[in-house]
């Protein structure tokens, strides 16, 4: 989430009982108050004197200010104010008051523990109005109008909820057998008894919102502030709540002293001492830690997606990319039993997701003891990226990592960026019933996905407690309104857990039998896994024949037109699976029998590698049906047309044993099709194992490209085969037609070591040379 803290949110509340993103960073919010004054022909400092009244909005309702300005005969100005909040009154004496005719500047200094905050004010008369800007940083904020007259007092009674929602089951209990459900806040400090009871009653876990961040807990190299962190841990333990620590290493809210001198060894020592002290203090008492927070840059494109795209932080500048590995290793040393997370926002989709996969693979390869990934989950109602979220779960699980939703909120109003009550993103009016129902549907669908992937999900944490205790106040993002009343979203989630939301529960028994299971020795099926979104799996139906003595090689398949369905190739792929292979084809199972809108969604070669990661992890997982049944050292990258280019694109992965390119070849120039991989002939150099082209003869639109590829490849064994059937191949024909025996013989030879199948390709008397329907050419090939 954004590094900006909601200090001013609490400042507006006056009592500063809020913990929501407060005091922890130098947030930037400006609030403008306009005071109506009697119009004078000439405006001067005399027009500024006297008493003014205005009301500011805050997460906790209206806050009334009574300002009093006095200017003595020497021209020195004194400004004071009484502030009426919902529960208390307080007095403010402003400092550095400067009056210059129709303008005024002043400041307020507030002390919180060892920390001092300064809020700057400036104002200028404009006709009958004095516009005052109050700022803590540079970001614009809300307007308020004041007069010389006393404002109408705020209502004493809280407004009734938009809709009365009854809850007959607690959310923490509804999902206790699936995952933890938690909330965030710096409890118990400045929370009411009602709020503390609400948090302990409904949630099973708590994440400190700010008090464990470096700036708050470790403001100086030799100074630590443990008062609030100790109180949180003690309160959570008293209420039997699991604690997740947030956060050890972050680019924001980290004091500059960590990086003074810019000496790498010194910075490394400071990092280690910080982690040792903080994580070590609560060793065995916290279940998990966000070790590194938000290290990846925002946005990105197709090029950055191939890299880690790390944020240019002080950590990166001083220690390089190794700072992440070091942080995880230090955290493991400080608390060996804690679950260690990488946490970030917007990593569920787009180039940032791809960069996260690159980063995580590198961390795992470097020996970083990372256990899980935290997807923050700051989404907008009506625009939640459900498919991307589910795919991210399966992608991260394919690396052997657990996943948590760490900072969940679904805003009703405004885009991301509406944090801390910024005016253009929020509204002080209640949401409509329609708003609440749409939000409820989104939350129900999210929790159906979480439940579907309960073997991967560790915890779902809401970022706040209610619609006041949230960094996005005014956007109504959570399960309780500002007065602790449950919203329809809560009821929709409970209905789902109780089995009343069956339309959101996918059918897990819809295996498809194609052509009676194929002609091979193993009757095959097309199926799917709830932990591998967007992939159809072709495999033998009965896996009992496979184990330590006989294992299934892996085939990764990309479709023609880079389509999101294997429907066109199902006979072909099913036939291969019936000969003892597991085929992972891009596209969901529900698009196999009848193609719908989803089949036209854009796909990418990264889905093939994610599927490979997944099946390798499944082979190593004891509870998986694929446990020790997969030959993870034998992998074929294969695809047709655009999918053939996807196969070429991933051929550089060292896990790929062989590549099979069907009805495809690298184009001489970039394709105008956005979905098509942007390859050049230089990408042919990625081949590092034997390559087979299965083409449709001169009438195949990809024929010239493929033949040019063949002429250029001299560094690996390569075979070019052609059957004069055109670009469509024989995939739709019974059992995949004449393409199937050729593909199976190649796979048996290179993935199963059955050298007798080399006779299909090798020698002047090879089977294909003797078959008048086929032509064959080869280079660097032998038995």
Image (tube, rainbow, N blue to C red):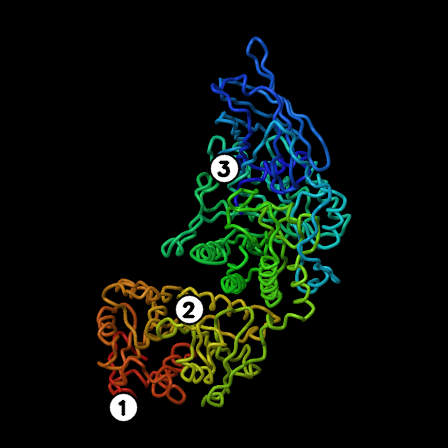
Q: Kindly identify the residue that appears in the image at 40 percent across and 69 percent down.
A: 656
Q: Are marks 2 and 3 in contact (CB under 8 Å)?
A: no
Q: Quadrant of the C terminus?
A: bottom left
Q: Are marks 1 and 2 in contact (CB under 8 Å)?
A: no
Location of residue 738 by image quarter: bottom left
Badge 3 crowding class, 10 Å Cα cut-off, few under 14, some 14 to 19, many 20 or more, is some
Q: Kindly identify the residue that appears in the image at 57 percent across and 42 percent down.
A: 420
Question: Distance from label 1 to label 2 (Cα)?
Answer: 39 Å
Measured as percent of width and height from the top left, residue 156 is found at 73, 41
Question: Distance from label 1 to label 3 (Cα)?
Answer: 77 Å
Location of residue 178 by image quarter: bottom right
Q: Which mark is residue 140?
A: 3
Pointer 1 or 2: first along the chain: 2
Pointer 2 or 3: first along the chain: 3
The answer to which of 756 and 495 lies nearer the viewer is 495
Q: Does 340 sit above or below residue 319?
A: below
Q: Secondary structure at mark 3?
A: loop
The answer to which of 462 and 649 lies nearer the viewer is 462
Measured as percent of width and height from the top left, residue 444 is found at 61, 64
Measured as percent of width and height from the top left, residue 185 is found at 66, 45
Measured as percent of width and height from the top left, residue 57 is found at 61, 39
Residue where numbered disc 2 is placed: 601
């Amino acid at each position: 989430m954004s590094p900006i803290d909601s200090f001013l949110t609490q400042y507006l509340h006056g009592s500063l009982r809020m913990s929501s993103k407060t005091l922890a960073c130098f947030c930037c919010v400006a609030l403008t108050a306009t005071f109506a004054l009697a119009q004078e022909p000439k405006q001067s400092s005399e027009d500024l004197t006297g008493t003014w009244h205005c009301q500011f909005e805050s997460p906790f309702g209206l806050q009334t200010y009574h300002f009093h300005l006095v200017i003595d005969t020497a021209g020195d100005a004194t400004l004071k104010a009484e502030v009426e909040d919902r529960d208390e009154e307080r007095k403010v004496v402003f400092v550095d008051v400067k009056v210059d005719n129709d303008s005024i500047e002043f400041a307020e200094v507030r002390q919180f523990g060892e920390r001092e905050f300064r809020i700057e004010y400036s104002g200028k008369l404009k006709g009958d109005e004095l516009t005052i800007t109050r700022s803590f940083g540079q970001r614009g904020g809300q307007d308020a109008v004041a007069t010389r007259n006393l404002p109408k007092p705020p209502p004493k009674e809280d407004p009734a909820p938009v809709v009365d929602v009854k809850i007959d089951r607690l959310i923490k209990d509804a999902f206790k057998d699936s995952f933890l459900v938690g909330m965030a806040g710096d409890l118990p400090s400045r929370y009411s008894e009602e709020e503390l009871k609400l948090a302990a009653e409904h949630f099973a876990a708590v994440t400190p919102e700010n008090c464990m961040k470096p700036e708050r807990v470790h403001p100086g190299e030799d100074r630590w502030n443990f008062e609030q962190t100790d109180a949180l841990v003690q309160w959570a333990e008293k209420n039997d709540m699991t604690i997740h620590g947030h956060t050890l290493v972050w680019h924001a809210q980290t004091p500059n002293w960590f990086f003074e001198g810019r000496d790498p060894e010194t910075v490394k020592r400071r990092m280690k001492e910080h982690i040792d002290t903080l994580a070590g203090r609560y060793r065995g008492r916290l279940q998990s830690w966000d070790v590194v927070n938000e290290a990846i840059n925002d946005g990105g494109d197709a090029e950055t997606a191939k890299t880690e795209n790390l944020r240019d932080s002080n950590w990166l500048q001083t220690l390089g990319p190794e700072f992440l590995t070091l942080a995880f290793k230090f955290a493991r040393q400080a608390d060996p039993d804690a679950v260690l997370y990488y946490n970030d926002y917007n990593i569920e989709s787009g180039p940032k997701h791809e960069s996260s996969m690159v980063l995580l693979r590198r961390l795992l390869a470097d020996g970083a003891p990372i256990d899980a990934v935290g997807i923050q989950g700051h989404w907008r109602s009506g625009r939640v990226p459900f498919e991307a979220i589910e795919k991210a779960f399966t992608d991260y699980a394919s690396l052997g990592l657990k996943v948590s939703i760490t900072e969940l909120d679904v805003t009703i109003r405004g885009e991301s960026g509406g944090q801390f009550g910024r005016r253009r993103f929020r509204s002080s009016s209640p949401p409509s019933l329609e708003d609440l129902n749409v939000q409820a549907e989104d939350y129900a669908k999210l929790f159906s996905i979480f439940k579907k992937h309960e073997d991967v999900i560790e915890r779902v944490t809401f970022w706040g407690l209610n619609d006041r205790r949230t960094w996005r106040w005014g956007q109504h993002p959570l399960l309780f309104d500002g007065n602790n009343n449950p919203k329809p979203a809560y009821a929709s989630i409970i209905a789902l857990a109780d089995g009343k939301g069956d339309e959101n529960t996918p059918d897990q028994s819809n295996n498809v039998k194609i052509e009676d299971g194929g002609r091979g020795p193993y009757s095959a099926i097309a199926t799917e896994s709830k932990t591998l979104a967007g992939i159809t799996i072709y495999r033998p139906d009965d896996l009992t024949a496979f184990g330590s003595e006989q294992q299934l090689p892996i085939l990764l398949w990309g479709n023609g037109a880079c389509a999101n369905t294997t429907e066109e190739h199902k006979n072909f792929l099913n036939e291969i699976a019936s000969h003892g292979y597991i085929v992972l084809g891009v596209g969901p199972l529900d698009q196999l029998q009848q193609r719908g809108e989803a089949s036209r969604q854009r796909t990418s070669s990264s889905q093939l590698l994610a599927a490979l990661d997944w099946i390798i992890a499944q082979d190593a997982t004891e509870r998986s049906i694929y446990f020790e049944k997969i030959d993870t050292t034998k992998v074929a990258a294969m695809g047709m047309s655009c999918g053939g280019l996807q196969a070429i694109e991933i051929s550089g992965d060292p896990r790929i044993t062989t590549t099979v390119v069907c009805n495809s070849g690298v184009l001489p120039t970039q394709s105008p099709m956005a979905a098509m991989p942007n390859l050049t002939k230089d990408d042919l150099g990625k081949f590092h194992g034997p390559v087979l082209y299965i083409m449709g003869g001169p009438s195949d639109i990809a024929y010239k490209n493929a033949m040019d590829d063949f002429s250029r490849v001299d560094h690996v064994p390569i075979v070019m085969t052609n059957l004069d059937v055109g670009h469509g191949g024989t995939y739709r024909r019974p059992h995949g037609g004449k393409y199937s025996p050729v593909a199976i013989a190649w796979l048996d030879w290179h993935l199963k070591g059955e050298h007798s199948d080399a006779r299909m390709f090798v020698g002047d008397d090879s089977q294909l040379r003797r078959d008048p329907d086929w032509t064959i050419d080869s280079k660097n090939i032998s038995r």
